[in-house]
Amino acid sequence: MRTHQHILASLSLLAVSGGGAGAAHAVGTRASTSLAFTAPLLRTVDVVDATHGWVARDTILTTTDSGVTWRQQYPSAAPALTIRPTVPRAPTAPVGPMHSLDMVSSDTGWLVTTHHVYVTHDGGTVWTPVLSVRGRAIAATAFLTASTGWIATGTLTAPVAHILHTTDAGATWTTAPATLPPIVFLSFPDPRDGWALASPQGLSGPQQAVDLFRSTDGGYTWTRVSARGLPLGGIKTGFIFQSARRGYLAVMSYAQRPIVLWRTGDGGETWSAASFPPYTWRQPAIASAQAPFLFPSGVVVPVTQRSALAPRAVEATETWRVALRPTTSSTWRLGQAVTFRTSAAADLAIPTSFISLEDGWAATPRGLLCTTDGGRQWRSISATPLVTQARQLEFVTSSIGWAVLHNGRVTKTTDGGRTWREQTSPPISRLWSRLALKVGAVTR
């Protein structure tokens, strides 16, 4: 019985192409496979309800999950295919816990959940799925431009990581042939030079042993770096390279005199502690740095300190500020301290975003703060929960920015953070029965 015949009038299956079973072909020196169906081939379409459907002519494909995955039924069984639906003129909502948001312009950006990668080209109104990772989770990401990015995936049962790379905004992905230990951070300052920080043993109390790997061919091959001086102590909280030689590692430390930032000037071969100005640590304390913001004119590092906690304490005192070092100087300058009470179980990191050495925002429990002088002074500009509950801030201009909330929602501002609007829409699975579906490339 055809209970959803009205779908057929609007359903447009244009093409299915990409990495399924099929003839292998070479792209440069890297082999890949493809399975291509032209538009005339998929001539017959039949949908019986909101989740089950078939397309057929010489080949029959079936779906049981609203078109997210397809399985070949005829002429012979083939591996299941995952497609990327693009829904024209309709907003979509990413599904699953948010991993990261990386906007490269006012219109274009990447959003990553545990198992999916999405791209927007209209400032976040429409998020198009470009990759679905089945049986694994996305552990680390690095996005360089609107078209170029890398992700590292892994599983809890297998202590290995796979690195995938795209140069066409997610239309196709190349998988590196070698596997690495579980990766916690990726960084690519340019299309060829990249670093992966791996944590084979995970956390061990206040310590986290790490291994460093480097690629010089865009993430296709990797070699281990000696990384002399890289600290064992402390939990690694941020990792970024500014060039092929200069990089930074942020750490959360429980030491008596915490060192929260390490740097390298030789591509990761050797590391040394960054020397902040004299800092009055409340003893004992937990101190943490976040990944630095890197600009041609200098470096900005958010730094947080939390007071010692009494047994069963539910609240703690937290002091947050930024450390700044201009390129023309060899010394660091500490900005205005912002102190507040917070939950003892709250994340130590304060969501922060800088678009220059002077202009930045921070989502604190006291509200959204803004600076225009490199953190010397901060002023409150908003107290709406649409930003105070943020787990990540991402500004691209002095007016336009986004916040990812702890509940996974994404909010946007177009007036520098004074007002915020939640970007919500129906989940993509519901769009199957109401909207035209353009089928793009296929990935396994």
Image (tube, rainbow, N blue to C red):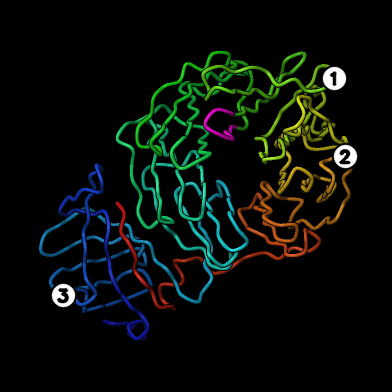
Kind of element beneath mark 3: loop
Position of residue 307 in the picture relative to residue 154 (left or right)? right
State the count of labels.
3
Sequence-wise, the earlier of marks 2 and 3 is 3
Secondary structure type for disc 1: loop
Label 1 vs 3, first from the N-terminus? 3
Q: Nearest the camera: 444 or 273?
A: 273
What SS does tag 2 mark? loop
User: x%, y% of residue 418?
Assistant: 81, 61
Return the x and y of residue 351 as percentages of the image width and height. 71, 44
Vertically, is 114 above or below 77?
A: above
What amino acid type is highlighted by mark number 1?
Pro
Three-letter amino acid code of the residue under disc 3: Arg
Q: Identify the residue at the far front of this view.
A: 328
Taking the view exactly as shown, the residue that stands out farthest to the left is 75
Q: Which residues are magenta?
A: 239-246
Q: Nearer the viewer, mark 2 or mark 3?
A: 2
Please say whether residue 64 is visible from this viewpoint.
yes
Question: Disc 3 designates what residue?
Answer: 57
Give the image location of residue 334, x and y in percent.
83, 31
Q: Which mark is residue 278?
A: 1
